[in-house]
Amino acid sequence: MPPPAVQNPIKMPPLRFRSLPLLAFTLIVALLAGGCGPKAESAAGKGAGKGKGKGGGAAPVLVGPVQRQKVPVVIDAIGAVEPIRNTAIRSQVTGILEKIAFTEGRDVKEGDLLFQIDPRPFRGALNAALAEQKKAQVQLENARAQVTRYQALTAEQMISKEQFQKIQDEARTAEAELQAADSRVSSATLQLEFSSIRAPISGRTGNLSVDEGDIVRANDAATLVSINQVSPIYVTFGVPQQYLAAINRYRASGSLAVRVTPPGIDEKAELGELSFVDNTVDSATGTIRLKATFKNADHRLWPGQFANVSVTLAEPEVLTVASAAIQTSQTGQHVYVVSAERLAELRPVVVERTYEGLAVITKGLKEGETVVIDGQLRVVPGRPVEIKQPASATGEAPTKAKSEKSKKAKDGAPEARPTTKA
């Protein structure tokens, strides 16, 4: 019998359409595997080769020589500028200030008139004292004449000795009165001189505290003006007590030079000489007080000013290297010495002191050796180094700033200059 008919059969898609996603996925995986394998191997090989080359290369460094040169032994400190002489002007008499004969803040010389107090009362007192002096002189002359006259009468026994003694006493009293009158004249003369106040020293005047017409009083606590001697001048400073023995030792063989640099921009040092060492050490601070004298002809040092002080004890010839060559580790200080074969050697050293970018070496190096002064982080002891030259000595291209400067000059533009603010 024939099979029964199927109603509404379901149509299946062709086989090629069902297999398309699986085939596409297989092709993509094959392409990725074929393309990435060679590249990965190549990259890995290059990376391995690069690392191997870097580990065996010479370290680039800058070097400097070990040489002998004179390096001063210097003690640095902070000092204060002080006048050698300072005076506070006060009045010794009471009166009206009639005249101020100088300009405050200007230099005056010893003996110059500063203030004039009204002299009329003092001149009148002097005239009265002179009159009393003249009167006393007349009385003394009369008393002496009486003594001469009565002395002859006493010899002739015309008067008693008691009367003659009384006349002699009167003469001695007149002589004492004359001496008192002379003293009053001297005092009145001195008071008249005190009415003219003159400069006791040469120096620079300070701020005025009075005006013309004011009443000034004798022995008043307030000063009329002060005068400071500013040329020559002192600079006072303190150094730790451990330097005292060295200072005395070097000072015994000659004067010690002292340089002081006043505060300011581009200030140059003033040269002076150590002139004073205190006789005791300050127990509170453990320092010894010193003074240096400076000519200060240009008045660059000013009383009350702070300044940097350097005392030069000696200038011996010592073995030195650049301070940048010194490296510090747990075992102490060391440098890297470059041999003739350009191999690095770690060498322990003993540094005595440093001065202006130089390190004084007492042990570990010899004159003429070469040491690394830059690039120590890449140096391995026993490995080779490559000596480089500083940028300024290699003839390299100009920096960005120089290029811009040349470009502006070429274009005719004005050159920009740096400004410094005080």
Image (spheres, rainbow, N blue to C red):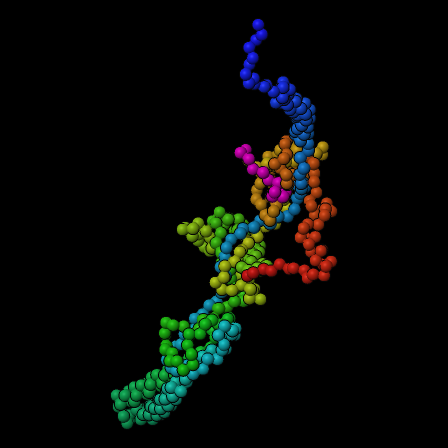
Whether residue 301 appears in magenta in the rendering, the answer is no
Quarter of the figure with the N terminus: top right
**Side (left or right) of 287 relative to 159:** right
The residue closer to the viewer here, 274 or 94, is: 94
**Side (left or right) of 79 relative to 338:** left
The residue closer to the viewer here, 385 or 46, is: 46
Residue appearing at x 55%, y 61% in the figure? 422
Q: Is residue 268 visible?
A: no
Q: Is residue 293 above or below residue 117?
A: above
Residue appearing at x 49%, y 64% in the figure? 303
Q: Residue 132 placed where, x, y %?
A: 35, 89
Q: Residue 120 placed where, x, y %?
A: 40, 87
Q: Residue 348 placed where, x, y %?
A: 59, 34
Which of the 4 image quadrants contains residue 10?
top right
Query: What is the magenta range?
Result: 320-331
**Side (left or right) of 175 relative to 4:** left
Q: Is residue 152 above or below residue 176?
A: below
Q: Residue furthest top?
A: 1
Which of the 4 image quadrants contains residue 350?
top right
